[in-house]
């Protein structure tokens, strides 16, 4: 199966819509809104009725929300708002709380996919310095050229640029040269823009040794309102056979990151 196939497994059972990360976030926000109205706790049965979600879907969401700290399950089985939600919605040091929450999620993703994981954001006309989760067995790519100056060559950068409209892409490229970093780097602006135009939003963006020889990467968009952001991972080229599956897992587990940005 090609690396360029959309992430995901076999089709859902007939009559059942596949649940995308964005759909998970929308459902999770509905659950959180319902719980927040019940300061003394709300049972799963009441949540299922008021959030209008099937029991199996609600159970998955509740486990995810408790794991991420957005909800707390009391001894009587009811649910209340968790510490992570209170920190993010309090308005006090929100940026610091968001960074800490994202780092915790990235650490978990690193351990799940077995690769260094990155969170990138494009804001005010520039790619912000990426947040990274790596480790002894999952080393991050050597940033021999700052990611902010190499958006044309990295999966993370190309994923962010693909979310911009044509004029904003041109604006970015007018301010940043697109030098050749390896023999595989696209340095023709026309070819780069064409590739970005043709990039499907459901397919991971790839970097097959375009940024650094010996490293392959993949990135998936993280959609939350108007935010332009993404998750990415990197692997040694010797593990390139794992790239497609790792990218699928990254996409499937993007919901907690989207949720943090949406709250």
Image (tube, rainbow, N blue to C red):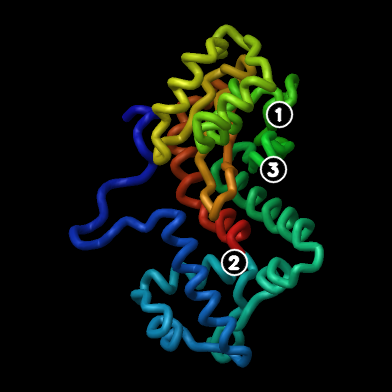
Alpha carbons under labels 2 and 3: distance apart: 18 Å
The numbered disc on residue 133 is 3
Residue labelled with disc 2: 67
Q: Nearer the viewer, residue 51 or 172?
A: 172
Residue labelled with disc 1: 148
Name the front one of labels 2 and 1.
1
Residues packed near mark 2 inside 10 Å, few (<14), some (14 to 19) or many (20 plus): few
Asked if residue 155 can be seen in this view, the reply is no
Compared with 28, 205 (above or below) is above
> Is residue 94 left or right of 200 when viewed as pictured?
right
Check the picture and name the quadrant holding the N terminus: top left
Residues packed near mark 3 inside 10 Å, few (<14), some (14 to 19) or many (20 plus): many
In the image, residue 190 lies at what x, y percent?
49, 14
Residue at 48 percent of width and 73 percent of height: 30
Alpha carbons under labels 2 and 1: distance apart: 33 Å
Kind of element beneath mark 1: helix
Kind of element beneath mark 3: strand
Asked if residue 9 can be seen in this view, the reply is yes
Alpha carbons under labels 3 and 1: distance apart: 18 Å
**Upstream in sequence: badge 3 or badge 1:** 3
Residue at 50 percent of width and 25 percent of height: 240
Name the front one of labels 3 and 1.
1
In the image, residue 230 lies at what x, y percent?
57, 42
């Amino acid at each position: 199966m090609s690396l360029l196939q959309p992430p995901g497994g076999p089709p859902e059972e007939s009559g059942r819509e596949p649940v995308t990360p964005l759909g998970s976030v929308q459902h999770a926000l509905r659950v959180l809104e319902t719980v927040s109205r019940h300061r003394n706790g709300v049972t799963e049965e009441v949540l299922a009725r008021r959030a209008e979600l099937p029991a199996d879907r609600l159970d998955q969401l509740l486990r995810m929300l408790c794991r991420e700290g957005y909800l707390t399950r009391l001894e009587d089985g009811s649910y209340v708002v968790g510490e992570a939600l209170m920190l993010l919605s309090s308005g006090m040091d929100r940026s610091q709380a968001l960074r800490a929450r994202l780092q915790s999620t990235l650490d978990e993703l690193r351990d799940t996919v077995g690769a260094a994981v990155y969170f990138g954001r494009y804001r005010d006309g520039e790619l912000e310095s990426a947040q990274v989760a790596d480790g002894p067995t999952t080393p991050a790519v050597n940033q021999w050229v700052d990611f902010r100056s190499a958006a044309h060559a990295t999966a993370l950068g190309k994923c962010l640029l693909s979310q911009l409209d044509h004029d904003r892409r041109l604006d970015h490229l007018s301010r940043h040269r697109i030098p050749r970093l390896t023999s595989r780097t696209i340095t023709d602006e026309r070819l780069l823009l064409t590739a970005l135009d043709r990039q499907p939003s459901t397919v991971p963006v790839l970097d097959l040794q375009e940024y650094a020889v010996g490293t392959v990467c993949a990135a998936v968009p993280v959609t939350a309102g108007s935010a332009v952001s993404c998750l990415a991972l990197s692997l040694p080229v010797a593990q390139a056979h794992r790239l497609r599956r790792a990218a699928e897992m990254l996409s499937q587990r993007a919901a907690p990151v989207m949720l943090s940005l949406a709250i």
